[in-house]
Image: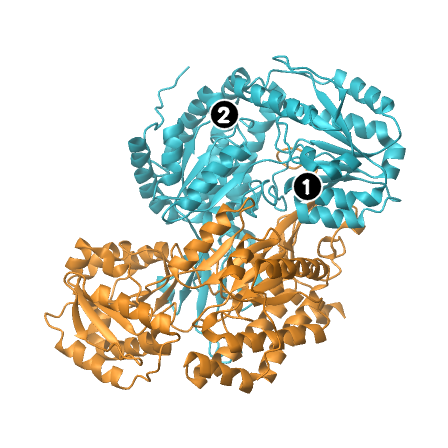
Chain colours: A orange, B cyan
Amino acid sequence: MNTALSPATTAAEVDRAARAAHEAYLISADQTPATRASWLTALAEALRAHDDELVGLAAEETHLAEPRLRGELKRSAFQLELFAEEVRTGVVLEAVVDHADPDWGMGPRPDIRRVNVPLGVVGVFGASNFPFAFSVMGGDSASALAAGCAVLHKIHGGHKQLALRTAEVVIEALAQAGAPEGLFAVLDGREAATALVDHPLVKAVGFTGSTAGGRALFDRAAARPEPIPFYGELGSINPVFVLPQAWRHRAEEILTGYAGSFTMGMGQFCTKPGVLFVPDEGGTERVRETLSAALADAPLAKLLTPGLRESFGQARDEVAALEGVETLVPGSDDEVPAPTVLAVDAEQVRKDPEVLHHEMFGPATVLVRYRDAAELPELAELMEGQLTATVHGDEEDDSTALVGTLTGKAGRVLFNGWPTGVTVSYAQHHGGPYPATTTNTTSVGTAAIGRFMRPVSYQDAPDAALPPALQEANPWGIARRVDGRFEPAVTEGARR
Amino acid sequence: MNTALSPATTAAEVDRAARAAHEAYLISADQTPATRASWLTALAEALRAHDDELVGLAAEETHLAEPRLRGELKRSAFQLELFAEEVRTGVVLEAVVDHADPDWGMGPRPDIRRVNVPLGVVGVFGASNFPFAFSVMGGDSASALAAGCAVLHKIHGGHKQLALRTAEVVIEALAQAGAPEGLFAVLDGREAATALVDHPLVKAVGFTGSTAGGRALFDRAAARPEPIPFYGELGSINPVFVLPQAWRHRAEEILTGYAGSFTMGMGQFCTKPGVLFVPDEGGTERVRETLSAALADAPLAKLLTPGLRESFGQARDEVAALEGVETLVPGSDDEVPAPTVLAVDAEQVRKDPEVLHHEMFGPATVLVRYRDAAELPELAELMEGQLTATVHGDEEDDSTALVGTLTGKAGRVLFNGWPTGVTVSYAQHHGGPYPATTTNTTSVGTAAIGRFMRPVSYQDAPDAALPPALQEANPWGIARRVDGRFEPAVTEGARR
């Protein structure tokens, strides 16, 4: 295998990479949308062209199943193409034009025009659990490049060979597409990680990982002489609430879906359902039997890393030891762990909500038995910020108050489905109140691009001094807001 | 004068106000856009109805001239009405609808719909220098209420009687308009200020003030168990660059405009031009004479507060004492200070750029003499982040490289004008890289509202469970992005 690429590992190497990245960003910021979009599509093509090799490396290092890995690579390539289209059509620029107006209500208004520009060099931390979609050319890298930024990517030690090889593919594709040298580089190791967050030329950081690790880096980014945005996706329990009528009509189907969702990828998803609220039936035998049967079919594998296995085992033991928590399906502590289901009464959770705050990153989950659906909003209120919250309800179930509470708690509210599996689209929001994420932004979907841009307004600028997106003739034909009214993009068809 | 209003001053009182505000926010979040907009227009009417009384109080406490204060009140009322319109038309909701799509490029897409919701209770700090536009019912309060949030406003000690009376007017107007009790309240004093930033129910803070004070509160907000966004507008030097041909053709006009801009409101503007780059003519007599003549007409007044007078005098002395800095127009240290103009060579600034980083909040400014316009981008690069940067150039002047550099340094780039005076509009951006602001957002203009909202997505929700903004029939007729295409608002005319 080819690992000619040598990642920056010392602070001095990070400094060199950051300076080169800054120079590349200055060039990138000046490109037309079409040019920048072409770099993204070149990356998509390169990932697809190397899919067998990259998926093979990923399977070896992560123990994740091949179909899952192929799906993840496909998603990453699609994401680049979708972002390319957002760039090409100018949507990411959010151009606004206010013409001079002598009659403006607060007094004469000058000509003011606003557009988004890239932030500069962006630091991205690779995640253990998504070797493609949240790693070298995952969502954070793709959105930062789409914004016009340069990217310094700190690879994750859990899939280092894959990361280095993917980086080679990326760097080669960018070079062939004509992107400036230094626009993308990789770093490795702890010294490089802190040097990255501290570097004055780094203007934002994207991170996916643990709450403890993410918070330490967030604090570091906030404490800089010039604080920078730290877009961290940290922990989430992803509660699921089953309402009485849905439970009565399809408990078995729900439990089977639940078993599939919390064991998917060995439970190593940020959206894994960690708590299921179900009506108390006065006994758990039926639930135990259904779950045991469903879990017998779950495809098992080793966890991503030995460190992750250790912290999973510890979290599972801690939650199991909480007062009132019983073990419904015992699971195991083996190298290939069997899934664990714990259970507790809602009454106990109200006394000590710790079970709702303690993430077990791996194949374990907790059932919470409630007496009355009217308790659910209050129980939901005990939770911290979440990436997702899910409601299973039938038409006769009244979920109004619960959905209201969950809107305040989660970034995505699902109905009669499962939170694992996050589509990349225009309306997606993958983020939520802390600790789900450190800011009110999304790390998935086209809205993720805006995290790496900032607005600039030009006042009374001569037309020639304006960026093309703001010039009076709208030479790129992009959608703009003009004097308060939204004007659609001039489609290519119409312009020809 | 009536000061029946008793602001919260202890942590316990802040806690009570925060709980009441949280309850009010829950009610506010559920209102239709039309209802929430009606509260904003009621506030605009109430401010106007009390203009004589409020302007009188403001003049007494701030020493600012009456026309300026009347203009500021007018701006604040207009701002409320402009924001009301953004709320009423649903622009602030940024609704996005992605229908389920079995053929979506990365695999079948569920139905996903996203909308902005209010953050919760917002803390706002009043500014010394804008008794209306950045105080009790200024930009931060107006945008937080427009977002659907509740507001706890920490009044500024520099105009306490005005703040308390304005708060009474605001609270009465909100009550008469039917807004929930507790939606707006005022706090006073240091204990209340820190309790506000620390309170778990407070979900964001808006601040306008000094870099030192703002940074301390920013650090506090970031260090909370649940960190919250701190939207701080701190310091800015607002450089102005005069290019050679503009200087040749209209030096006198430029110097006169400059004198008017840096002494406006006694130089107590965040956008005061603190540095003017001009060509080195081999002597400064002409400049001195022109400035002295222009400054002779400047209307002078006491500074806003004794504390501000002291820190202004200190900053002015510190900058004057920097190596190579000479005094062009001496000004004074009196209670009503005469304006000061300092001067320095660009060569010296390159050796020690401190003069470019040291804000003098008051009527003082620095001329920097450069030899060659080609130096300007490099000199601009020595500056920190700025709210504004201005270029004075004629057609023969080449400003391309300079404007490129300034785009990276400032939130607003002006041409042949002066940065003081900030219009409230759709395209306005009042913010910039740190220390101009602590985040890449604006505190002026309609885009300020979004700071106090966060997105929430709903996946596969039954239509009845969706907020009206996302329902299939679009009952509010708002503009939405549907399956990637932007669909305009249904105008009221069209709906009838």
**Residue B479 image offset from top left, x and y in percent:** 54, 57
Q: Pick the residue in front: A333 or A204.
A: A333
Q: Secondary structure at mark 1?
A: loop
What's under tag 2, amino acid-wise? Ala
Is residue A266 placed above or below A457 in the rendered structure?
A: below
What's under tag 1, amino acid-wise? Met
**Residue A273 image offset from top left, x and y in percent:** 31, 69
- Say which residue appears at 64% left-offset and 65% top-offset: A87
Is residue A181 placed above or below A109 in the rendered structure?
A: below
Q: Secondary structure at mark 2?
A: helix
* Residue occupied by mark 2: B49
Task: Give the mark nearer the N terminus: 1 vs 2.
Answer: 2
- Contact, mark 1 vs mark 2 (Cβ under 8 Å): no
* Residue occupied by mark 1: B383
**Which quadrant of the view contains residue A116?**
bottom right
Image quarter where the C terminus of chain A lies is bottom right
Image quarter where the N terminus of chain A lies is bottom right
Image position of B164 (left or right of A21): left
Q: Marks 1 and 2, Cα distance to the nearest angstrom?
A: 44 Å
Image position of B252 (left or right of B4): right
Binning the other alpha carbons within 10 Å of mark 1 as few (below 14), some (14 to 19) or many (20 upward) gives many
**In this orientation, does residue A56 appear?**
yes
- Say which residue appears at 68% left-offset and 41% top-offset: B383
- Say which residue appears at 47% left-offset and 41% top-offset: B218
**Residue B295 image offset from top left, x and y in percent:** 75, 19
Image position of B264 (left or right of A463): left
Subunit ID for the residue under disc 2: B
